[in-house]
Image: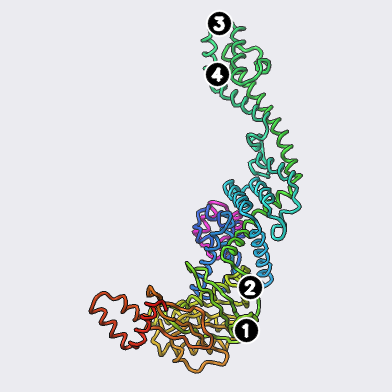
Amino acid sequence: MRLEDYWGVGPKTAETLRAALGEERAIAAIDAADVAALADAGVSRGRATRVLRRANGEAGMDLFGTADARKVYDGLLSLAAEFAVTEHAADRVRVLTPLTDPEERRERLTDVLEARDTWTALDDEERAAVLDAFREFDEAGGTDPAAVEATLALREAGLRGGTFAALEGIDDGELREAGRALAAFGGDRGDGEGDARVADGADEKLDRLREQRDAARDLENSAFDVIDTVRERGVRDADAFRSAVVEHFASETDLTRGRVESAAPEGAVDSADYVSGTLRGLVSDLEDDVAARADEVRSELEAAVEEAGEDVDAAVRAVSDIAFLLSLARFAEEHDMAEPELGGDGVAVANARNLLLDGDVQPVTYAVGDHDLDIDAPSGDRVTVLTGANSGGKTTLLETLCQVTVLASMGLPVPAEAAEIGSFDTVVFHRRHASFNAGVLEATLKSIVPPLSDEGRTLMLVDEFEAITEPGRAADLLNGLVELTVDHDALGAYVTHLAEDLSPLPDVARVDGIFAEGLTSDLQLRVDYQPRFGTVGRSTPEFIVSRLVANATDRSEKAGFQKLASAVGEEAVQRTLSDAAWGG
Protein backbone atom coordinates (compact mmCIF):
# COMPACT_ATOMS: atom_id res chain seq x y z
CA MET A 1 0.00 0.00 0.00
CA ARG A 2 1.27 3.47 -0.90
CA LEU A 3 0.76 6.68 1.05
CA GLU A 4 -1.43 8.08 -1.71
CA ASP A 5 -3.84 5.16 -1.22
CA TYR A 6 -4.96 6.63 2.11
CA TRP A 7 -7.94 9.01 2.15
CA GLY A 8 -6.81 12.63 2.26
CA VAL A 9 -3.13 11.95 1.45
CA GLY A 10 -2.43 13.72 -1.83
CA PRO A 11 0.94 14.05 -3.60
CA LYS A 12 2.02 17.06 -1.52
CA THR A 13 1.18 15.46 1.83
CA ALA A 14 2.74 12.17 0.76
CA GLU A 15 5.97 13.91 -0.22
CA THR A 16 6.06 15.73 3.12
CA LEU A 17 5.70 12.44 4.99
CA ARG A 18 8.28 10.63 2.85
CA ALA A 19 10.84 13.39 3.37
CA ALA A 20 10.40 13.38 7.14
CA LEU A 21 9.67 9.72 7.93
CA GLY A 22 10.13 7.60 4.85
CA GLU A 23 7.34 5.56 3.26
CA GLU A 24 7.39 2.64 5.69
CA ARG A 25 7.46 4.70 8.91
CA ALA A 26 4.80 7.07 7.59
CA ILE A 27 2.44 4.18 6.78
CA ALA A 28 3.11 2.68 10.22
CA ALA A 29 2.23 6.03 11.84
CA ILE A 30 -1.05 6.19 9.92
CA ASP A 31 -1.95 2.60 10.79
CA ALA A 32 -1.16 3.35 14.46
CA ALA A 33 -3.32 6.53 14.39
CA ASP A 34 -0.27 8.51 15.55
CA VAL A 35 -1.31 12.13 15.14
CA ALA A 36 1.87 13.42 16.79
CA ALA A 37 4.14 11.60 14.30
CA LEU A 38 2.31 13.09 11.33
CA ALA A 39 2.21 16.54 12.91
CA ASP A 40 5.95 16.42 13.70
CA ALA A 41 6.53 15.45 10.07
CA GLY A 42 4.90 18.69 8.93
CA VAL A 43 1.24 17.76 8.41
CA SER A 44 -1.22 20.08 10.18
CA ARG A 45 -2.92 18.46 13.17
CA GLY A 46 -6.34 19.08 11.64
CA ARG A 47 -5.45 17.28 8.42
CA ALA A 48 -3.63 14.52 10.30
CA THR A 49 -6.73 13.95 12.44
CA ARG A 50 -9.01 13.76 9.40
CA VAL A 51 -6.66 11.39 7.59
CA LEU A 52 -6.39 9.07 10.58
CA ARG A 53 -10.13 9.02 11.21
CA ARG A 54 -10.70 7.79 7.68
CA ALA A 55 -7.69 5.47 7.67
CA ASN A 56 -8.74 3.69 10.86
CA GLY A 57 -12.51 4.01 10.78
CA GLU A 58 -13.72 4.83 7.29
CA ALA A 59 -16.84 2.68 7.53
CA GLY A 60 -17.79 4.37 10.80
CA MET A 61 -17.34 7.85 9.35
CA ASP A 62 -20.08 7.06 6.85
CA LEU A 63 -22.52 7.51 9.74
CA PHE A 64 -22.42 11.27 9.21
CA GLY A 65 -24.79 12.12 6.39
CA THR A 66 -24.45 15.90 6.65
CA ALA A 67 -21.90 18.55 7.56
CA ASP A 68 -23.98 19.47 10.61
CA ALA A 69 -23.77 15.89 11.90
CA ARG A 70 -19.99 15.96 11.46
CA LYS A 71 -19.82 19.26 13.37
CA VAL A 72 -21.61 17.65 16.30
CA TYR A 73 -19.11 14.77 16.15
CA ASP A 74 -16.15 17.17 16.02
CA GLY A 75 -17.53 19.20 18.91
CA LEU A 76 -18.00 16.13 21.10
CA LEU A 77 -14.47 14.84 20.50
CA SER A 78 -12.96 18.28 21.07
CA LEU A 79 -14.80 18.45 24.38
CA ALA A 80 -13.73 14.92 25.36
CA ALA A 81 -10.09 15.66 24.48
CA GLU A 82 -10.07 18.42 27.12
CA PHE A 83 -10.09 15.67 29.76
CA ALA A 84 -7.13 13.77 28.30
CA VAL A 85 -4.35 12.91 30.74
CA THR A 86 -1.61 12.83 28.07
CA GLU A 87 -1.09 14.43 24.67
CA HIS A 88 -1.12 11.03 22.98
CA ALA A 89 -4.39 10.17 24.72
CA ALA A 90 -5.88 13.44 23.46
CA ASP A 91 -4.86 12.48 19.94
CA ARG A 92 -6.41 9.03 20.33
CA VAL A 93 -9.65 10.62 21.53
CA ARG A 94 -9.73 13.00 18.57
CA VAL A 95 -9.46 10.15 16.06
CA LEU A 96 -12.22 8.05 17.63
CA THR A 97 -14.80 7.02 15.05
CA PRO A 98 -18.16 5.28 15.24
CA LEU A 99 -17.89 1.51 15.51
CA THR A 100 -19.83 -0.57 13.01
CA ASP A 101 -19.65 -3.76 15.09
CA PRO A 102 -22.24 -3.69 17.94
CA GLU A 103 -20.08 -6.00 20.05
CA GLU A 104 -17.12 -3.62 19.78
CA ARG A 105 -19.37 -0.79 20.96
CA ARG A 106 -20.42 -2.78 24.01
CA GLU A 107 -16.82 -3.74 24.81
CA ARG A 108 -15.63 -0.14 24.68
CA LEU A 109 -18.61 1.03 26.70
CA THR A 110 -17.82 -1.56 29.38
CA ASP A 111 -14.16 -0.51 29.48
CA VAL A 112 -14.98 3.19 29.79
CA LEU A 113 -17.57 2.64 32.50
CA GLU A 114 -15.20 0.43 34.50
CA ALA A 115 -12.50 3.07 34.15
CA ARG A 116 -14.94 5.71 35.34
CA ASP A 117 -15.91 3.64 38.36
CA THR A 118 -12.26 3.15 39.28
CA TRP A 119 -11.48 6.84 38.81
CA THR A 120 -14.53 7.86 40.85
CA ALA A 121 -13.44 5.61 43.71
CA LEU A 122 -10.06 7.35 44.07
CA ASP A 123 -9.70 10.11 46.64
CA ASP A 124 -8.26 13.53 45.79
CA GLU A 125 -4.72 12.55 46.77
CA GLU A 126 -4.81 9.41 44.66
CA ARG A 127 -6.22 11.29 41.69
CA ALA A 128 -3.46 13.87 41.97
CA ALA A 129 -0.86 11.09 42.03
CA VAL A 130 -2.33 9.54 38.87
CA LEU A 131 -2.40 12.86 37.01
CA ASP A 132 1.17 13.62 38.15
CA ALA A 133 2.31 10.24 36.84
CA PHE A 134 0.86 10.96 33.41
CA ARG A 135 2.20 14.53 33.43
CA GLU A 136 5.72 13.25 34.12
CA PHE A 137 5.25 10.57 31.45
CA ASP A 138 4.35 13.29 28.94
CA GLU A 139 7.22 15.55 29.97
CA ALA A 140 9.65 12.65 29.55
CA GLY A 141 8.48 12.22 25.98
CA GLY A 142 6.61 8.96 26.50
CA THR A 143 9.77 6.83 26.44
CA ASP A 144 9.92 3.24 27.69
CA PRO A 145 11.62 4.26 30.98
CA ALA A 146 8.90 6.89 31.46
CA ALA A 147 6.25 4.23 30.85
CA VAL A 148 7.86 2.01 33.48
CA GLU A 149 7.91 4.84 36.05
CA ALA A 150 4.30 5.74 35.20
CA THR A 151 3.21 2.13 35.62
CA LEU A 152 4.78 1.90 39.05
CA ALA A 153 3.19 5.20 40.08
CA LEU A 154 -0.25 4.13 38.80
CA ARG A 155 -0.06 0.84 40.69
CA GLU A 156 0.90 2.70 43.84
CA ALA A 157 -2.00 5.14 43.35
CA GLY A 158 -4.51 2.29 43.25
CA LEU A 159 -5.33 1.78 39.57
CA ARG A 160 -5.86 -1.97 39.60
CA GLY A 161 -8.40 -4.50 38.42
CA GLY A 162 -11.15 -4.25 35.83
CA THR A 163 -10.10 -2.04 32.96
CA PHE A 164 -6.67 -1.69 34.54
CA ALA A 165 -6.02 -5.43 34.86
CA ALA A 166 -3.04 -4.96 32.53
CA LEU A 167 -1.19 -3.58 35.56
CA GLU A 168 -1.67 -6.83 37.45
CA GLY A 169 0.95 -9.57 37.45
CA ILE A 170 3.84 -7.16 36.95
CA ASP A 171 6.85 -7.73 39.21
CA ASP A 172 7.62 -4.33 40.71
CA GLY A 173 11.21 -5.21 41.60
CA GLU A 174 12.12 -6.48 38.15
CA LEU A 175 10.28 -3.60 36.54
CA ARG A 176 12.24 -1.06 38.60
CA GLU A 177 15.54 -2.66 37.61
CA ALA A 178 14.47 -2.72 33.98
CA GLY A 179 13.46 0.93 34.26
CA ARG A 180 16.91 1.88 35.54
CA ALA A 181 18.50 -0.14 32.77
CA LEU A 182 16.36 1.46 30.10
CA ALA A 183 17.11 4.90 31.48
CA ALA A 184 20.80 4.01 31.25
CA PHE A 185 20.23 3.07 27.62
CA GLY A 186 18.43 6.34 26.99
CA GLY A 187 15.18 4.38 26.62
CA ASP A 188 16.55 2.40 23.65
CA ARG A 189 16.02 -1.35 23.78
CA GLY A 190 17.50 -1.88 20.33
CA ASP A 191 21.05 -2.84 19.41
CA GLY A 192 23.74 -0.28 20.06
CA GLU A 193 27.43 0.11 19.38
CA GLY A 194 30.21 1.40 21.59
CA ASP A 195 30.06 2.89 25.04
CA ALA A 196 27.83 5.78 23.91
CA ARG A 197 24.80 3.54 24.27
CA VAL A 198 25.26 3.51 28.05
CA ALA A 199 24.15 6.88 29.42
CA ASP A 200 26.15 8.91 31.90
CA GLY A 201 25.25 8.12 35.48
CA ALA A 202 24.61 4.43 34.83
CA ASP A 203 27.91 3.32 36.42
CA GLU A 204 30.32 5.32 38.58
CA LYS A 205 33.46 3.51 37.36
CA LEU A 206 32.48 4.03 33.71
CA ASP A 207 31.79 7.71 34.36
CA ARG A 208 35.24 8.14 35.97
CA LEU A 209 36.99 6.36 33.09
CA ARG A 210 35.17 8.58 30.59
CA GLU A 211 36.23 11.70 32.46
CA GLN A 212 39.86 10.52 32.48
CA ARG A 213 39.75 9.65 28.77
CA ASP A 214 38.23 13.04 27.89
CA ALA A 215 40.86 14.84 29.96
CA ALA A 216 43.60 12.93 28.12
CA ARG A 217 42.03 13.84 24.78
CA ASP A 218 42.01 17.51 25.75
CA LEU A 219 45.72 17.30 26.62
CA GLU A 220 46.41 15.52 23.31
CA ASN A 221 44.93 18.45 21.45
CA SER A 222 47.25 20.86 23.22
CA ALA A 223 50.55 18.93 23.37
CA PHE A 224 52.77 21.97 22.63
CA ASP A 225 51.07 23.92 25.42
CA VAL A 226 52.02 21.06 27.78
CA ILE A 227 55.69 21.37 26.78
CA ASP A 228 55.64 25.11 27.46
CA THR A 229 53.89 24.62 30.81
CA VAL A 230 56.48 22.08 31.99
CA ARG A 231 59.45 24.15 30.82
CA GLU A 232 58.11 27.21 32.58
CA ARG A 233 58.79 25.30 35.80
CA GLY A 234 62.54 25.56 35.08
CA VAL A 235 63.00 21.93 34.10
CA ARG A 236 66.09 21.46 31.90
CA ASP A 237 67.45 17.87 31.79
CA ALA A 238 65.57 15.01 30.08
CA ASP A 239 64.85 12.91 33.17
CA ALA A 240 63.44 15.86 35.08
CA PHE A 241 61.36 16.82 32.01
CA ARG A 242 59.87 13.33 31.71
CA SER A 243 59.12 13.26 35.45
CA ALA A 244 57.43 16.67 35.29
CA VAL A 245 55.35 15.61 32.28
CA VAL A 246 54.17 12.46 34.05
CA GLU A 247 53.31 14.52 37.14
CA HIS A 248 51.36 17.03 35.02
CA PHE A 249 49.40 14.32 33.16
CA ALA A 250 48.58 12.50 36.40
CA SER A 251 47.30 15.71 37.94
CA GLU A 252 45.18 16.70 34.92
CA THR A 253 43.64 13.25 34.37
CA ASP A 254 43.36 12.06 37.99
CA LEU A 255 45.46 9.00 37.09
CA THR A 256 48.35 7.53 39.07
CA ARG A 257 51.94 8.24 37.97
CA GLY A 258 52.41 4.57 37.30
CA ARG A 259 49.42 4.51 34.94
CA VAL A 260 50.81 7.47 32.99
CA GLU A 261 54.35 6.05 32.88
CA SER A 262 53.04 2.78 31.48
CA ALA A 263 51.69 4.67 28.45
CA ALA A 264 54.98 6.52 27.78
CA PRO A 265 56.87 5.49 24.60
CA GLU A 266 60.33 3.98 24.72
CA GLY A 267 63.07 5.65 22.73
CA ALA A 268 61.42 9.05 22.28
CA VAL A 269 63.76 11.24 20.20
CA ASP A 270 62.86 14.56 21.83
CA SER A 271 60.47 16.25 24.29
CA ALA A 272 57.70 16.72 21.72
CA ASP A 273 57.88 13.05 20.73
CA TYR A 274 57.73 12.02 24.40
CA VAL A 275 54.73 14.21 25.19
CA SER A 276 52.70 13.30 22.09
CA GLY A 277 53.61 9.62 22.33
CA THR A 278 52.60 9.45 25.99
CA LEU A 279 49.29 11.13 25.27
CA ARG A 280 48.54 8.86 22.31
CA GLY A 281 49.21 5.80 24.40
CA LEU A 282 47.26 7.17 27.34
CA VAL A 283 44.19 8.00 25.21
CA SER A 284 44.34 4.59 23.53
CA ASP A 285 44.61 2.76 26.85
CA LEU A 286 41.75 4.73 28.36
CA GLU A 287 39.54 4.19 25.33
CA ASP A 288 40.13 0.44 25.70
CA ASP A 289 39.30 0.65 29.40
CA VAL A 290 36.12 2.62 28.71
CA ALA A 291 35.00 0.15 26.04
CA ALA A 292 35.69 -2.82 28.29
CA ARG A 293 33.82 -1.33 31.23
CA ALA A 294 30.94 -0.26 28.95
CA ASP A 295 30.67 -3.84 27.71
CA GLU A 296 30.43 -5.10 31.28
CA VAL A 297 27.79 -2.52 32.24
CA ARG A 298 25.84 -3.03 29.04
CA SER A 299 25.71 -6.80 29.62
CA GLU A 300 24.37 -6.24 33.15
CA LEU A 301 21.76 -3.76 31.90
CA GLU A 302 20.68 -5.96 29.02
CA ALA A 303 20.22 -8.85 31.41
CA ALA A 304 17.97 -6.70 33.62
CA VAL A 305 15.90 -5.59 30.62
CA GLU A 306 15.66 -9.13 29.25
CA GLU A 307 14.59 -10.52 32.61
CA ALA A 308 11.72 -8.01 32.82
CA GLY A 309 11.13 -7.75 29.07
CA GLU A 310 7.51 -8.93 29.15
CA ASP A 311 6.76 -6.66 32.09
CA VAL A 312 8.28 -3.69 30.24
CA ASP A 313 6.23 -4.45 27.14
CA ALA A 314 3.11 -4.75 29.29
CA ALA A 315 3.90 -1.45 30.99
CA VAL A 316 4.34 0.40 27.70
CA ARG A 317 1.04 -0.94 26.34
CA ALA A 318 -0.78 -0.43 29.61
CA VAL A 319 0.19 3.22 30.07
CA SER A 320 -1.03 4.17 26.60
CA ASP A 321 -4.31 2.25 26.90
CA ILE A 322 -4.97 3.41 30.46
CA ALA A 323 -4.34 7.04 29.53
CA PHE A 324 -6.88 6.71 26.73
CA LEU A 325 -9.58 5.03 28.82
CA LEU A 326 -8.98 7.27 31.83
CA SER A 327 -9.37 10.33 29.61
CA LEU A 328 -12.77 9.10 28.45
CA ALA A 329 -13.65 8.15 32.04
CA ARG A 330 -12.92 11.69 33.26
CA PHE A 331 -15.07 13.07 30.43
CA ALA A 332 -17.93 10.78 31.41
CA GLU A 333 -17.65 11.60 35.10
CA GLU A 334 -17.48 15.36 34.57
CA HIS A 335 -20.71 15.35 32.55
CA ASP A 336 -22.53 12.73 34.63
CA MET A 337 -22.93 10.45 31.62
CA ALA A 338 -24.77 7.15 31.82
CA GLU A 339 -24.66 3.77 30.12
CA PRO A 340 -27.10 3.63 27.20
CA GLU A 341 -28.99 0.50 26.29
CA LEU A 342 -27.59 -0.32 22.86
CA GLY A 343 -30.07 -1.80 20.43
CA GLY A 344 -33.74 -1.58 19.73
CA ASP A 345 -35.43 0.36 16.97
CA GLY A 346 -35.50 3.92 18.20
CA VAL A 347 -33.88 6.76 20.10
CA ALA A 348 -35.20 7.37 23.61
CA VAL A 349 -33.66 9.49 26.34
CA ALA A 350 -34.59 10.32 29.92
CA ASN A 351 -33.48 13.74 31.17
CA ALA A 352 -30.89 14.21 28.43
CA ARG A 353 -28.60 17.24 28.32
CA ASN A 354 -26.88 18.99 25.43
CA LEU A 355 -23.12 18.85 26.09
CA LEU A 356 -22.29 21.74 23.78
CA LEU A 357 -24.37 24.33 25.66
CA ASP A 358 -22.92 26.55 28.37
CA GLY A 359 -24.55 27.18 31.73
CA ASP A 360 -27.47 25.40 33.34
CA VAL A 361 -29.35 23.22 30.87
CA GLN A 362 -32.90 21.94 31.42
CA PRO A 363 -32.84 18.20 30.72
CA VAL A 364 -35.46 16.80 28.38
CA THR A 365 -37.11 13.43 27.93
CA TYR A 366 -37.94 12.41 24.38
CA ALA A 367 -38.32 9.45 22.07
CA VAL A 368 -38.81 8.59 18.43
CA GLY A 369 -39.37 5.02 17.25
CA ASP A 370 -39.86 1.91 19.38
CA HIS A 371 -38.36 1.74 22.86
CA ASP A 372 -38.75 -0.01 26.22
CA LEU A 373 -37.45 2.84 28.37
CA ASP A 374 -39.53 3.63 31.42
CA ILE A 375 -40.43 7.20 30.44
CA ASP A 376 -43.59 9.13 29.57
CA ALA A 377 -42.58 9.56 25.92
CA PRO A 378 -44.69 7.42 23.56
CA SER A 379 -43.21 4.41 21.77
CA GLY A 380 -43.79 3.33 18.20
CA ASP A 381 -43.99 6.65 16.32
CA ARG A 382 -41.55 6.52 13.41
CA VAL A 383 -41.69 10.29 12.89
CA THR A 384 -42.19 13.24 15.21
CA VAL A 385 -43.00 16.79 14.16
CA LEU A 386 -41.72 19.19 16.79
CA THR A 387 -43.47 22.55 17.05
CA GLY A 388 -43.59 25.49 19.41
CA ALA A 389 -42.11 28.70 20.65
CA ASN A 390 -39.29 30.61 19.05
CA SER A 391 -36.11 30.13 21.14
CA GLY A 392 -37.90 27.17 22.68
CA GLY A 393 -35.07 24.69 22.32
CA LYS A 394 -36.36 22.72 19.34
CA THR A 395 -33.04 22.79 17.49
CA THR A 396 -31.23 22.08 20.74
CA LEU A 397 -33.36 18.97 21.19
CA LEU A 398 -32.47 17.74 17.70
CA GLU A 399 -28.80 18.33 18.45
CA THR A 400 -29.13 16.48 21.77
CA LEU A 401 -30.60 13.46 19.99
CA CYS A 402 -27.73 13.65 17.50
CA GLN A 403 -25.18 13.79 20.34
CA VAL A 404 -26.49 10.76 22.21
CA THR A 405 -26.70 8.77 18.97
CA VAL A 406 -23.14 9.67 17.96
CA LEU A 407 -21.72 8.94 21.42
CA ALA A 408 -23.51 5.59 21.58
CA SER A 409 -22.22 4.71 18.11
CA MET A 410 -18.67 5.16 19.43
CA GLY A 411 -19.33 2.98 22.47
CA LEU A 412 -19.35 5.87 24.92
CA PRO A 413 -21.71 6.85 27.75
CA VAL A 414 -24.33 9.50 27.00
CA PRO A 415 -25.46 12.67 28.84
CA ALA A 416 -28.78 11.35 30.15
CA GLU A 417 -30.15 9.54 33.16
CA ALA A 418 -31.07 6.65 30.87
CA ALA A 419 -31.15 6.05 27.13
CA GLU A 420 -31.99 3.40 24.58
CA ILE A 421 -30.22 3.94 21.28
CA GLY A 422 -30.67 1.84 18.16
CA SER A 423 -28.06 1.29 15.49
CA PHE A 424 -28.04 3.55 12.42
CA ASP A 425 -26.13 3.53 9.18
CA THR A 426 -26.62 7.26 8.63
CA VAL A 427 -27.48 10.24 10.82
CA VAL A 428 -28.84 13.24 8.93
CA PHE A 429 -28.74 16.32 11.14
CA HIS A 430 -29.67 19.55 9.38
CA ARG A 431 -29.71 22.87 11.18
CA ARG A 432 -31.87 25.81 10.18
CA HIS A 433 -29.94 27.85 7.62
CA ALA A 434 -31.68 31.16 6.93
CA SER A 435 -30.81 31.62 3.25
CA PHE A 436 -34.00 31.93 1.25
CA ASN A 437 -32.99 30.95 -2.29
CA ALA A 438 -33.28 28.09 -4.73
CA GLY A 439 -29.59 27.22 -4.46
CA VAL A 440 -29.81 26.58 -0.73
CA LEU A 441 -33.00 24.57 -1.14
CA GLU A 442 -31.43 22.40 -3.81
CA ALA A 443 -28.26 21.85 -1.80
CA THR A 444 -30.30 20.97 1.29
CA LEU A 445 -32.47 18.44 -0.55
CA LYS A 446 -29.39 16.87 -2.18
CA SER A 447 -27.89 16.53 1.29
CA ILE A 448 -30.79 15.02 3.20
CA VAL A 449 -32.82 12.99 0.68
CA PRO A 450 -30.22 10.50 -0.69
CA PRO A 451 -29.60 8.81 2.71
CA LEU A 452 -33.32 8.04 2.89
CA SER A 453 -33.18 6.38 -0.51
CA ASP A 454 -30.06 4.30 0.21
CA GLU A 455 -29.96 0.91 1.85
CA GLY A 456 -29.53 0.97 5.60
CA ARG A 457 -31.22 2.63 8.58
CA THR A 458 -31.34 6.40 8.72
CA LEU A 459 -32.08 8.84 11.52
CA MET A 460 -33.41 12.17 10.21
CA LEU A 461 -33.09 15.26 12.43
CA VAL A 462 -34.17 18.21 10.29
CA ASP A 463 -34.78 21.79 11.36
CA GLU A 464 -37.24 24.32 9.84
CA PHE A 465 -37.64 23.84 6.10
CA GLU A 466 -39.63 27.09 5.98
CA ALA A 467 -36.34 28.97 6.43
CA ILE A 468 -35.21 28.03 2.92
CA THR A 469 -38.38 28.26 0.85
CA GLU A 470 -41.82 29.83 1.04
CA PRO A 471 -44.04 28.40 3.82
CA GLY A 472 -46.64 26.78 1.56
CA ARG A 473 -44.09 24.88 -0.47
CA ALA A 474 -42.11 24.06 2.68
CA ALA A 475 -45.19 22.32 4.09
CA ASP A 476 -45.50 20.28 0.89
CA LEU A 477 -41.82 19.30 1.04
CA LEU A 478 -42.09 18.40 4.70
CA ASN A 479 -45.09 16.18 3.99
CA GLY A 480 -43.04 14.43 1.35
CA LEU A 481 -40.10 13.93 3.71
CA VAL A 482 -42.33 12.50 6.42
CA GLU A 483 -43.84 10.02 3.96
CA LEU A 484 -40.41 9.14 2.56
CA THR A 485 -39.12 8.54 6.10
CA VAL A 486 -41.99 6.18 6.87
CA ASP A 487 -41.79 4.40 3.50
CA HIS A 488 -38.09 3.63 3.95
CA ASP A 489 -38.47 2.45 7.56
CA ALA A 490 -36.31 5.33 8.82
CA LEU A 491 -36.81 7.44 11.92
CA GLY A 492 -37.23 11.19 11.86
CA ALA A 493 -37.73 14.26 14.03
CA TYR A 494 -38.67 17.37 12.05
CA VAL A 495 -38.91 20.89 13.49
CA THR A 496 -41.44 23.25 11.94
CA HIS A 497 -43.81 26.14 12.60
CA LEU A 498 -46.12 24.79 9.91
CA ALA A 499 -47.73 21.85 11.68
CA GLU A 500 -51.25 23.14 11.00
CA ASP A 501 -50.44 23.42 7.28
CA LEU A 502 -49.37 19.81 6.91
CA SER A 503 -51.57 17.21 5.28
CA PRO A 504 -52.82 14.46 7.55
CA LEU A 505 -49.73 12.69 8.87
CA PRO A 506 -49.27 8.91 8.69
CA ASP A 507 -50.51 6.92 11.67
CA VAL A 508 -46.91 6.31 12.79
CA ALA A 509 -46.21 10.05 13.07
CA ARG A 510 -47.06 12.42 15.91
CA VAL A 511 -46.88 16.13 16.61
CA ASP A 512 -45.16 17.40 19.79
CA GLY A 513 -45.02 20.92 21.15
CA ILE A 514 -42.75 23.15 23.23
CA PHE A 515 -44.45 25.99 25.07
CA ALA A 516 -43.34 29.39 26.25
CA GLU A 517 -45.00 30.29 29.54
CA GLY A 518 -44.41 34.04 29.75
CA LEU A 519 -41.67 36.45 30.71
CA THR A 520 -39.46 36.45 33.78
CA SER A 521 -39.20 39.51 36.01
CA ASP A 522 -36.18 40.66 33.96
CA LEU A 523 -38.25 40.19 30.77
CA GLN A 524 -36.50 37.03 29.56
CA LEU A 525 -38.63 34.44 27.80
CA ARG A 526 -39.69 31.70 30.20
CA VAL A 527 -39.88 28.38 28.36
CA ASP A 528 -40.62 24.83 29.42
CA TYR A 529 -38.15 23.03 27.20
CA GLN A 530 -39.74 19.64 27.85
CA PRO A 531 -41.95 18.86 24.83
CA ARG A 532 -45.59 17.95 25.39
CA PHE A 533 -46.37 14.87 23.36
CA GLY A 534 -49.20 14.82 20.86
CA THR A 535 -49.78 18.58 21.15
CA VAL A 536 -49.04 21.42 18.73
CA GLY A 537 -46.78 23.95 20.42
CA ARG A 538 -48.00 27.51 20.83
CA SER A 539 -46.17 30.40 19.18
CA THR A 540 -45.23 33.34 21.37
CA PRO A 541 -45.60 36.66 19.50
CA GLU A 542 -47.42 38.29 22.44
CA PHE A 543 -44.48 37.51 24.74
CA ILE A 544 -41.96 38.99 22.34
CA VAL A 545 -44.10 42.08 21.69
CA SER A 546 -44.62 42.48 25.44
CA ARG A 547 -40.89 42.63 25.95
CA LEU A 548 -40.47 45.14 23.15
CA VAL A 549 -43.18 47.35 24.64
CA ALA A 550 -41.59 47.19 28.09
CA ASN A 551 -38.06 47.90 26.85
CA ALA A 552 -38.96 50.74 24.44
CA THR A 553 -37.53 54.11 25.55
CA ASP A 554 -38.40 56.24 22.53
CA ARG A 555 -42.05 57.49 22.52
CA SER A 556 -42.67 56.85 18.82
CA GLU A 557 -40.98 53.48 19.00
CA LYS A 558 -43.14 52.51 21.97
CA ALA A 559 -46.26 53.60 20.09
CA GLY A 560 -45.30 51.36 17.20
CA PHE A 561 -44.87 48.35 19.45
CA GLN A 562 -48.19 49.10 21.18
CA LYS A 563 -49.82 49.03 17.74
CA LEU A 564 -48.36 45.54 17.27
CA ALA A 565 -49.68 44.64 20.72
CA SER A 566 -53.21 45.41 19.63
CA ALA A 567 -52.67 43.23 16.55
CA VAL A 568 -51.53 40.15 18.51
CA GLY A 569 -53.91 40.73 21.41
CA GLU A 570 -53.50 43.71 23.69
CA GLU A 571 -55.14 41.92 26.59
CA ALA A 572 -52.62 39.07 26.33
CA VAL A 573 -49.73 41.56 26.18
CA GLN A 574 -50.94 43.41 29.27
CA ARG A 575 -51.46 40.15 31.14
CA THR A 576 -47.92 39.06 30.22
CA LEU A 577 -46.44 42.33 31.49
CA SER A 578 -48.44 42.11 34.68
CA ASP A 579 -47.33 38.53 35.33
CA ALA A 580 -43.71 39.50 34.71
CA ALA A 581 -43.94 42.45 37.10
CA TRP A 582 -45.30 40.15 39.82
CA GLY A 583 -42.90 37.36 39.00
CA GLY A 584 -45.74 35.16 37.74
Q: Quadrant of the N terminus?
A: bottom right
Q: Which residue is drawn at 60% across and 62% down?
A: 328
- Give the residue number, with chain letter if any, for mark 4: 223
User: Is residue 126 something that shows in the picture?
Assistant: yes
Does the magenta portion include 569? no
- Give the residue number, with chain letter if any, for mark 1: 370
Does the magenta portion include 27? yes
- Give the residue number, with chain letter if any, for mark 3: 236
Helix, strand or loop at label 1? It is loop
Q: How is the image coloured?
A: rainbow
User: Going by the picture, which residue comes out furthest to the front?
Assistant: 582
Q: Could you say which quadrant of the image residue 288 lies in?
A: top right
Q: Earlier in the sequence, mark 3 or mark 1?
A: 3
Amino acid found under the numbered disc labelled 4: Ala
Q: Which residue is drawn at 65% across and 20% down?
A: 255
Number of numbered discs overlaid on the protein picture: 4
Nearer the observer, disc 1 or disc 4? Answer: 1
Q: Could you say which quadrant of the image residue 174 lies in?
A: top right
Could you say which disc has been placed on residue 142 in the image? Answer: none
- In this rendering, the answer to whether 321 lies above or below 68 is above
- Give the residue number, with chain letter if any, for mark 2: 340
The CA span between labels 1 and 4 is: 92 Å
Amino acid found under the numbered disc labelled 3: Arg
The CA span between labels 3 and 4 is: 18 Å
- In this rendering, the answer to whether 256 lies above or below 236 is below
The CA span between labels 3 and 1 is: 108 Å
User: Going by the picture, which residue comes out furthest to the top?
Assistant: 237
Q: In which quarter of the image is the C terminus?
A: bottom left
Nearer the observer, disc 3 or disc 2? Answer: 2
Region rendered in magenta: 2-28
